[in-house]
Amino acid sequence: MTPQADSTPDEQPPDGGGTSDSGRSNPHGSSGSESNPGDAATVHENTNYLEAEVNILRPSTPFMRDHLRLIWVGFLAWTLVIFGPVTATYVAPETMTETTFLGFPLHYFLVAIGGPGGALLLSVVYSWRRDRLDRKYGIDHDAPAGTPSQEASGDSEVATDGGVRETNVGRGSVDNTLSEDEPCDDKPYNDARYGDNGRHRRRS
Amino acid sequence: MTIELLGVVWLSVELWSLSALVESGPLQLLPEALDSSFKPVPALTTIGMLVLFLAVGYVFAVADTDDMWVAGRSIGNVENGMAIGANWMSAASYLGMAALIALSGFYGLAFVVGWTAGYFILLIFMAAQMRRFGKYTAPDFVGDRFNSDSARAIAAITTLLLAFVYAVGQAVGMGLVGMYIFGADYTVLVVVMMAITVGYLALSGMLGATKNMALQYVILIIAFLVGLWAVGLAQGYSTFVPQIEYGALAADLGAEFTEPFRGDDSYYLWVATAFSLIVGTAGLPHVLVRFYTVENETIARWSCVWGLFFICVLYLSAPAFAAFGTDLYLSEFGQMWGEGGMSDAEADVIVVLAAQLAGLPTWLVGLVAAGGIAAAIATTSGLFIAGSSAMSHDIYTTILNPEATQRQQVLVGRLTIVGLGVITTLTALDPPALVGELVALAFALAGSVLFPMFFLGLWWENTNRQGALAGMITGLSIWVIATFNSVVPATIGFVGDLAGENNVFSTTLDTWVPAIGSAFVAVPIVFAVTIVVSKLTEEPPLETKLMVRQCHSPQPMGKDTTAEDVVEDSVVTDGGDVVLCEASQQATDERSEESEGPRDKSEAHDSRGEH
């Protein structure tokens, strides 16, 4: 497809490509991606997303490549579902209006029911495939702060220092459970990015 | 104190405009076939609904700006989906959609398709990224992404303009449907209904409105579906799935109902209209703000899917309602299309009219009518919130008075709501087009100006301030020219005289850049202008690029974190000495001290205050 961005030296193109291919060809989608989550997840952990250029025409990380493939396939299907029937009606009005389906003239059915219904169906498929992509890369949105790297770097000590209590007072009791982790939410992220360097700095 | 004062001001303005109109003998919209008289049970149903909305609004009433704008960012999939649905199911969907399908046939389906298909584009290209960006309003996004207060101002003005055009359609719908229930003048009803909407909004912030909107969705969809089922059963059109069963009827109704591309409604116009509505959907501020209210991007995506589902329930039913209404009207009056057929005002109430002509009991027709009013109020409240936050947050606080206190912001926000209410009311008294067409104009505006900025801003990091400004001005100009050419002459008498026969200045322009589908032409031009200007000028600063990258990173983000926070933190870390957690801890402390609210979700707010 497109050349690898220079800024992500850690990732290995064959790995990323291979993983996505196996995920695609495996009929049991989720189990397929779970059987080799290591590859994608490793690539993911070694990718610094803040150094990867964002350009819809030039995906620069394996994740972005996979995501954009999903997006473009979805977009193509959507274009056909939404503008296909009306174009067909323009090109071949007689065939489209004289054929009937469930009592409807075909063109009417495909537009009035096929359009909204198709968009909804595609939305479900996209969101489901997108969630699968998260799993493939070992990403869990339900536990934003509870990743292993956090505990490993001793964040909990830092998080329970005096500052947090003050914050809790400001926030009211509703958020107590969350707020302990919250100030450090992006930490696992930074750990991954800066590796030992970042960790070292925090310790010092 | 302030609220009472505003109430008095509002009331006197309304009374003044009312008396002025009664004296001058205003033009009256009158759907003649509609049984317009005061009916106690439907009136009680409507009042009951409104009291319920106000009560819920009262319970959640807040004075704190952070709660007012994004409802604590704590809303789940289905609930947020319902709020999206209720926001969407305006008078244009509930009433106007069936009207367009009944009067315009196959062309009307461009609206069904355009207003649903857009959610897919929103979902795959924007919903999650917007959530990660984490800004309150569309102007916030544009201003922060392109580092420009001018861009923010243009987006804010566009938001205000949108709220106004869109709300006019709602006010017309409320007034027309109100006639069935209250039997009063159209003028009186528009004024009273808008007063109720504005009064409600002045009291409750968005937390109230959000809870409310899920409730409004439920009430709305029940009213619509019960009405549809009852009409289908009573007349023997359908049994359980009228959404599918109207097929044979539609085919029998005659060429006008199903024939593609009849009259002026060309293939080009169909595609342009649908395209315009699609990009408009993806650029509409009051839709996007819903994605800021959820906890994380997964929920943003799934609530978009749920929102589309809830919208589809209505949009698959509306054509059935239109078919039933058309058939009933034909058998009652003999003629549907053209001179002597159904008038615009009658078409806009066809949902209620169908229920009435089918001989349903008054309370049931009243329920359908009350649903129409609820639809209009739900949408108007969402629009006015977006408009008032654009004013208080983006124009007043950011540009005019950076030192503004929360009290001042709330006051400006409320004054904007009142102001919007007044001009909307006045314009709605003599509306220039069908409800659905008015709303479509707003979509063309959102699609031409805001959609390209969101799309390029999120998907191409090199889009810069100069490109955005040039693009937005281009989009705004195209929309203004198209609207001035095609819509304004029919609305304002002396402009119409200047324009000549067909009430358009240029027929060619009207054919290729129709006001309702102007985004079809505008979007490619705005994209091109934005890209070329961005390429010719300096690249945006690194922080901006980092924010864009953060929007696309698959890394989970904290509940109240914005892309900006993450980027700031990373810059701090890079700097060396400062320990990351302390830095972000400090930021959090500052934030909670400043807002002193029960929750802390004002990152966008405070970072603006700091710089």
Image: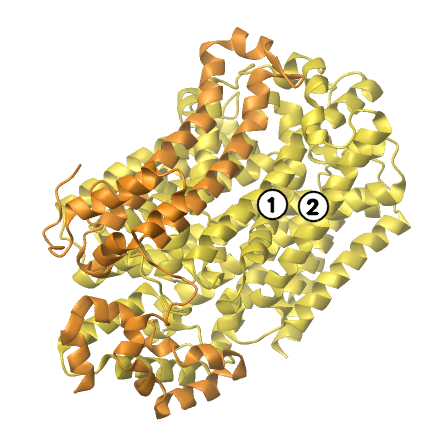
Q: In the displayed orientation, state which residue is furthest to the top.
A: A94
Query: Answer yes or no: do the residues labelled 1 and 2 have beta carbons within 8 Å?
Result: yes
- Spot occupied by residue A61 in the image (x, y as percentages of width and height): 21, 50
Q: Which mark is residue B221?
A: 2
Give the residue displayed 62% in from the left and 45% down from the top: B90
Which part of the image, by quadrant, shows the C terminus of chain B? bottom left
Q: Is residue B540 left or right of residue B305?
A: left
- Spot occupied by residue B256 in the image (x, y as percentages of width and height): 64, 15
Counting labels gives 2
Q: Is residue B206 above or below residue A203?
A: above
| Residue type marked 1 | Phe
| Residue type marked 2 | Ile
Label 2 Cα neighbours within 10 Å, binned few <14 / some 14-19 / many ≥20:
many
Q: Which chain is orange?
A: A
Coloring basis for residues: by chain
B420 or B466: nearer the viewer: B466
Q: Which chain is yellow?
A: B
Q: Earlier in the sequence, mark 1 or mark 2?
A: 2
Q: Which mark is residue B310?
A: 1
